[in-house]
Image (spheres, rainbow, N blue to C red):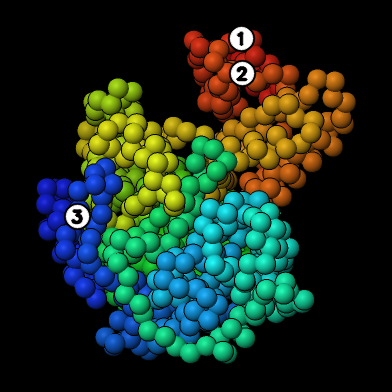
C-alpha cells in the first residue's frame, strides 16, 4: 500500500489501524476499547488491556527462536570494551535485577530514578523496572545536582540507581558527589541507592544507604514479568518547558509498545534481526525509544555506544561502529554529523571502513540544515532522512515513511505527517492557514498511541501547556509551514525552549541560575545560532545599581553557576553585561527580538516595546548592526 492510503486509513479508522498494529504484540489480556474517548480531551489507548513491555522486548523473542541472537551490543571506545548480550542473557540479567529492585522495596507503580552513564546496567535497570511494573525516570547524566533534585522531588522515587562515574572522552566524571548533593537538596539524603562501581573510579565509602549493584544481584533470583494495565505508566521523562520547572512526560505501557513496534517496519524499514543503532543517550527520549525499547520490541540488535562522534578516538568512530557491528540503520542528531564534518570534511576516515551494511541514516532532535543533510548523503550514499518529533510524542510525528514508501526528499523538511498524526498549521485565531503560510504546528486530537498521557501528578499543567491553546488540538510548541504537497517545514519554537546539540533546554532554568548571583538584578538568556550545536545559550545580565564587581571575574562565575546548577551541556557561549533589557510595556522581555539582533537578522521594532533605544544598546554590546 502507498503512504497516502495508509495515512488516510490511520485517521479515518484509527481503531482498526491501531488494533492491527497492537496484534503484533503479546497481551496478557486483550483491551476492551482501542481508543477510549469518554474523558476527552484526555484519551486512553487500549483501555482494559494488560501487557508487559519487558516481556515483549525480551522473553517473547527468547521463546520465539531469538534466544541466542544479539539483543544489545555495548560498544565503549572510552573504556576499550565491546560486550554482546544475547536475548537470553539480557532477559536473565534483567529478570534477576528486577528481583533486586523488589528486595529494595520497589513494587508495581513505584518510581525509580536512573541517573547513569551509557553502560548496559542503565538499559538493564530500565527493563527491570518495566518487568515488575515499576515506573522509571531516567535523568541525563549531564544534568547537575539541582536539576536532578527537582526531578527527585517531583517523582518521589523509592530508589535511585546510579554509577560511580561517567566517562566523557578522556574525562572521568564522578557521579556520586552530584547524586548525594541532589538527594540532600531534594530533602531525601538517605534514599536507598544501588550503585554500579566502575573500574575507572571504584566505589569508596559510598553513602550508608547505598548498595553495590553486584551485591544486589548476588542476593537476587530471576523473576517473571508482571502484567500491567495498558494505561499504566512505563516511565516518566522530564523535559524542558518554558519555566525552570521541568515537565514529567508520562508514557503509558500499551500505546508506547504498539507505536514503537509499528515504527520499526514502517518508518525505519528494519526487520527483526537487523542491527539498529541510535547514537544518542538513554537520558533523552531518542535513547528511551530507539536505543532501548523499539529495537528490542522488534527483535533487532541494538547498540549502546559510550562515546562521541569525534574524539573517541577520531571522526571515524561512527564508521568503525557501523562496520564492526554491521549496522543497518543509524539514527543520530544533525550536530553529530556537523562535528564529524568539521574534522573530516573530505570523509577520508570513511574510506578506512566498510559501511556497506548501512541502508539509511535518520536525523532528529533539532532542525537539520540542508548543508549537513547533503553532505551526509554524499558521504554515505544512502537515504538521509530528517524526521521531527519530541519527548512528548515519543516517536516521529513527521517523517519520510521509508518502510511504506520512500518519498522524494526535500532538504530542510522532515517530510510528511506520519500515519496517526493529523497535523495542521494554525494562525493566532486558531484557523488553518493556507498551505505555504507559517503558523503554529498543531496536532488534531486524539494523539495516536504512545504519546504522553499526562504530566506526572499534574493533569492541570498538562491541559494548560498542551491542550488549551486551541480547543481540540495538541500544541507542539513548534512553528512552521506545510507546503502544497503536505511537506512540513519546522522553523522555530514558539516558546523559550532552546535546542543545544539536540538537547532541549529551558532558558528559564538558565536564567534562574544566573539570577542566583547576588550582583545580578535581572537577566535574560536566549539561544543564538551556532554552526556546530545549532544553538547555544547567550546570557544578558543587568547588575544591581552600585555593583562594583570585576566584570571578567563575574562572567566566569556566571558561566560556572550555570554549569553547576543546570549542567555542563548548558554552558553559555558568553555573558553580556547590559544596562537594561528590552521589554514590552507590560514588562515581558523581548527575547525573540534580542535573538534576531544576535543572529544578525533583520528585525522589526515591536510596537509594544517600552523603549526602542534599548535595542541599539543590545546591538552595541553584541557589536552587530542595528536593523530596527
Ligand atoms: N555526563 C556528564 N557530562 C556531560 C555529559 C554526560 N552524559 N554529556 C555531555 N557532558 C559535558 C561534556 O563533557 C562537556 O563538558 P565540558 O564543557 O566540561 O567540556 C559539556 O557537557 C558539553 O558537552 P557536549 O554538548 O557533548 O559538547 P562537546 O563540545 O563536548 O561535544 C558534540 C560536541 C557535537 C560532539 C556533542 O555535542 C555530540 O555528540 N552531540 C550529539 C548530540 C546527540 O547525540 N544528541 C542526542 C539527541 S538525538
Ligand atoms: P526533544 O523533546 O528534546 O526531543 O526536543 C523536541 C524539539 O526539538 C521539537 O519540538 C523541535 O523544536 C526540535 N526538533 C526535533 N526534531 C526536529 C527536526 N527534525 N526538525 C526541526 N526541529 C526538530
Q: Nearer the viewer, mark 3 or mark 2?
A: 3
Q: Which residue is mark 1?
A: 611
Q: Is residue 623 left or right of residue 397?
A: right
In this rendering, is residue 474 above or below 134?
above
- Mark on residue 582? 2
Q: Secondary structure at mark 2?
A: loop
Q: Residue at x 45, y 73 (%)?
A: 107
Q: Residue at x 51, y 12 (%)?
A: 608
Q: Residue at x 30, y 61 (%)?
A: 231
- Give the CA separation, mark 3 to mark 2: 48 Å
Whether residue 622 is visible = yes
Q: Residue at x 26, y 50 (%)?
A: 43
- Mark on residue 35? 3
Q: Earlier in the sequence, mark 2 or mark 1?
A: 2
Q: Earlier in the sequence, mark 3 or mark 2?
A: 3
In this rendering, is residue 539 above or below 43?
above
Amino acid at each position: 500500500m502507498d503512504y497516502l492510503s495508509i495515512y488516510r486509513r490511520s485517521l479515518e479508522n484509527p481503531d482498526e489501524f491501531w488494533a492491527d498494529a497492537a496484534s503484533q504484540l503479546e497481551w496478557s489480556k486483550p483491551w476492551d476499547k482501542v481508543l477510549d474517548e469518554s474523558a476527552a480531551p484526555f484519551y486512553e489507548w487500549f483501555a482494559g488491556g494488560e501487557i508487559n513491555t519487558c516481556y515483549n522486548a525480551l522473553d517473547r523473542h527468547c521463546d520465539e527462536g531469538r534466544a541466542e541472537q544479539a539483543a544489545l551490543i555495548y560498544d565503549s571506545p572510552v573504556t576499550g570494551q565491546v560486550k554482546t548480550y544475547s536475548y537470553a542473557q539480557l532477559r536473565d540479567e534483567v529478570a534477576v535485577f528486577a528481583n533486586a529492585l523488589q528486595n529494595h522495596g520497589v513494587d508495581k507503580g513505584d518510581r525509580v530514578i536512573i541517573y547513569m552513564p551509557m553502560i548496559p546496567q542503565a538499559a538493564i535497570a530500565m527493563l527491570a523496572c518495566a518487568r515488575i511494573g515499576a515506573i522509571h525516570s531516567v535523568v541525563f547524566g549531564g544534568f547537575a545536582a539541582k536539576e536532578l533534585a527537582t526531578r527527585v522531588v517531583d517523582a518521589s522515587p523509592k530508589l535511585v540507581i546510579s554509577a560511580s562515574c561517567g566517562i566523557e572522552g578522556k574525562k572521568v566524571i564522578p557521579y556520586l558527589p552530584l547524586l548525594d548533593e541532589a538527594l540532600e537538596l531534594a530533602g531525601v539524603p538517605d534514599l536507598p541507592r544501588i550503585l554500579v562501581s566502575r573500574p575507572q573510579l571504584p566505589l569508596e565509602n559510598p553513602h550508608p544507604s547505598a548498595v553495590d549493584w553486584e551485591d544486589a544481584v548476588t542476593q537476587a533470583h530471576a523473576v517473571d514479568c508482571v502484567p500491567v494495565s495498558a494505561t499504566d505508566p512505563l516511565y516518566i521523562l522530564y523535559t524542558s518547558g518554558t519555566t525552570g520547572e521541568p515537565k514529567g512526560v508520562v508514557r503509558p505501557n500499551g500505546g508506547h509498545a504498539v507505536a514503537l513496534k509499528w515504527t520499526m517496519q514502517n518508518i525505519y524499514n528494519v526487520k527483526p534481526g537487523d542491527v539498529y543503532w541510535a547514537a544518542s543517550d538513554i537520558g533523552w527520549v531518542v535513547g528511551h525509544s530507539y536505543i532501548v525499547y523499539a529495537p528490542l520490541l522488534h527483535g533487532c540488535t541494538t547498540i549502546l555506544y559510550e562515546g562521541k562522534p569525534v574524539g573517541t578516538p577520531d571522526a571515524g568512530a561512527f564508521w568503525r561502529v557501523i562496520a564492526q557491528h554491521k549496522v543497518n540503520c543509524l539514527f543520530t542528531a544533525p550536530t553529530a554529523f556537523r562535528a564529524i564534518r568539521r574534522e573530516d570534511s573530505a570523509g577520508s576516515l570513511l574510506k578506512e571502513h566498510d559501511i556497506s551494511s548501512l541502508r539509511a541514516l535518520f536525523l532528529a532532535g533539532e532542525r537539520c540544515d540542508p548543508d549537513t543533510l547533503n553532505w551526509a548523503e554524499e558521504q554515505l550514499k544512502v537515504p538521509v532522512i530528517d524526521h521531527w518529533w519530541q519527548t512528548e510524542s515519543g516517536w516521529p510525528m513527521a517523517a519520510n515513511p521509508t518502510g511504506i514508501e520512500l518519498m522524494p526528499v526535500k532538504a530542510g523538511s522532515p517530510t510528511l505527517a506520519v500515519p496517526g498524526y493529523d497535523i495542521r498549521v494554525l494562525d493566532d485565531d486558531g484557523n488553518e492557514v493556507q498551505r505555504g503560510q507559517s503558523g503554529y504546528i498543531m496536532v488534531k486530537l486524539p494523539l495516536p498511541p504512545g504519546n504522553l498521557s499526562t504530566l506526572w501528578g499534574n493533569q492541570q499543567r498538562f491541559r494548560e501547556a498542551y491542550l488549551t491553546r486551541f480547543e481540540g488540538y495538541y500544541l507542539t510548541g513548534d512553528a512552521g509551514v506545510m507546503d502544497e504537497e503536505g511537506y512540513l517545514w519546522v522553523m522555530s519554537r514558539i516558546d523559550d525552549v532552546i535546542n543545544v546539540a539536540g538537547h532541549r533546554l529551558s532558558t528559564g532554568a538558565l536564567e534562574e541560575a544566573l539570577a542566583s548571583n547576588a550582583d545580578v538584578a535581572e537577566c535574560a538568556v536566549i539561544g543564538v545560532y551556532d554552526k556546530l550545536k545549532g544553538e547555544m545559550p547567550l546570557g544578558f545580565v543587568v547588575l544591581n545599581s552600585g555593583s562594583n564587581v570585576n566584570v571578567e571575574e563575574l562572567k566566569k562565575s556566571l558561566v560556572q553557576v550555570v554549569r553547576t546548577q543546570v549542567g555542563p551541556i548548558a554552558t553559555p557561549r558568553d555573558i553580556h553585561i547590559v544596562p537594561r533589557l528590552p521589554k514590552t510595556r507590560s514588562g515581558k522581555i523581548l527575547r525573540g527580538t534580542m535573538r534576531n539582533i544576535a543572529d544578525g537578522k533583520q528585525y522589526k521594532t515591536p510596537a509594544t516595546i517600552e523603549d526602542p533605544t534599548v535595542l541599539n544598546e543590545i546591538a552595541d554590546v553584541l557589536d552587530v548592526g542595528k536593523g530596527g
